[in-house]
Amino acid sequence: MKRLFKFFGSVGQEMKLVEWPTMKQTRRDSWVVVSTSILFAAYFALCDFVISKLLKLLF
């Protein structure tokens, strides 16, 4: 039980040292993730479309 309290005490100390991102950084990073996801989705949709058309021509 003593080790458990010591563990949570050290976790609390480490959390005080963490440098949390600002709201501006969080918004920017979220925008990068969303836009990259949309670009990859469009790319894979295009690849799927082209491959399906090629397969229909072959078979």
Image: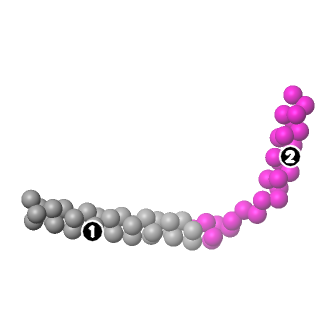
Q: Secondary structure at mark 1?
A: helix
Residue name at image x 68 percent, y 67 percent: 22
In this view, the mark in front (2 or 1): 1
Q: Which residue is mark 2?
A: 10
Which residue type does callout 1 highlight? Leu
Where is residue 51? Give x, y as percent.
22, 64
Mark 2 surroundings: few (<14), some (14-19) or many (≥20) residues within 10 A: few
Rendered image: mark on residue 46: 1
Residue 46 placement (x, y as % from top left):
27, 68
Expressed as whole percent of the image width and height from the top left, the position of residue 44 reads 32, 65
Which residue does the image show at 88% across and 34% down from the upper left? 3
| Secondary element at tag 2 | helix
The mark tally for this picture is: 2
Amino acid type at mark 2 = Ser
Which residue is rendered at x = 83% and y = 40% of the image?
8
Q: Residue at x 9, y 59 (%)?
A: 59
| Image position of 11 with respect to 19: above or below | above
Please determine whether, in this image, residue 3 is positioned above or below residue 43: above
Asked if disc 2 and disc 1 are in contact, CB closer than 8 Å, the reply is no
Magenta stretch bounds: 1-27
- Image coordinates of residue 31 in percent, x first then y, are 51, 69
